[in-house]
Amino acid sequence: GAVVSQHPSRVICKSGTSVKIECRSLDFQATTMFWYRQFPKKSLMLMATSNEGSKATYEQGVEKDKFLINHASLTLSTLTVTSAHPEDSSFYICSARGRNYEQYFGPGTRLTVT
Amino acid sequence: EDQVTQSPEALRLQEGESSSLNCSYTVSGLRGLFWYRQDPGKGPEFLFTLYSAGEEKEKERLKATLTKKESFLHITAPKPEDSATYLCAVQASTANSKLTFGKGITLSVRP
């Protein structure tokens, strides 16, 4: 099956700093990539959708200046959490959709802001 | 608005005790229905995509079926390693549509 990687898997940062998370589709070209956030024992919450070379589309209530998304190529998207605060601590998961509309998820990144 | 309801919320089975997980949906034109497995602290793992009513797909002990209103994930003779949360999602056939997820079913299989 298709493989999506995420890096780093875990990150701890201090309040006020920025953190970048990378998402790569390893064996297919992703026409669209998605970023989700997941709270403990809750379902996935879509944050934003991005197409290669276009600006990301953010879901209602998601601050685009805080969660910067760059979809630089058909295999790479990045999420930067700017000026992170403890309430941004969460599990972030990226997902990539190929030309057949099947959507594959990365392993997730656990962000802890101290 | 697209909706997905999964039942039951949690299911406990004895090893070898077959059962089914239900996913009911409403969508404005179905492009695909997806099943994923998620283990704690990990991203969802793709299992199946079903595109039209009557379609069935199998993988090891899992079999997914689809009707116009619901999908079932049948688990035959489950093993403890099948314990996980199973997510169902639908995608509408409109352009750039997103996945709409159910809340998931947490399956525990006792040895």
Image (tube, coloured by chain):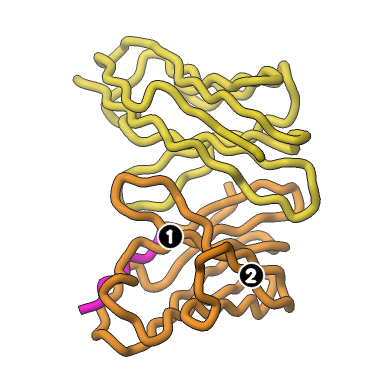
Chain colours: A orange, B yellow
Please give left or right for residue A19 compared with residue B15 in the image.
Answer: right
User: Residue at 65% of width from left, 29% of height from top?
Assistant: B26
Task: Give the structural element (helix, strand or loop) at label 1.
Answer: strand
Residue A89 in the image: above or below residue A72 = above
- Choose top left, top right, bottom left or bottom right for residue B55: top right
Q: Chief secondary structure of the magenta span?
A: strand
Chain of residue at mark 2? A
Task: Say few, some or many: other residues with alpha carbon within 10 Å of mark 1 (under 14 / 14 to 19 / 20 or more).
Answer: many
Find residue A29 and name its label.
none
Q: Position of residue A38 (x, y in %)?
A: 39, 55
Type of residue at label 1? Arg
User: Residue at 52% of width from left, 83% of height from top?
Assistant: A65
Residue that carries the numbered disc 1 in the rendered image: A37
The region drawn magenta spans: A108-114
Find residue A75 and name its label.
2
Chain of residue at mark 1? A
Check chain identity for marks 2 and 1: say if they share one.
yes
- Choose top left, top right, bottom left or bottom right for residue B84: top left
User: Residue at 61% of width from left, 21% of height from top?
Assistant: B70
Residue B96 in the image: above or below residue A12 = above
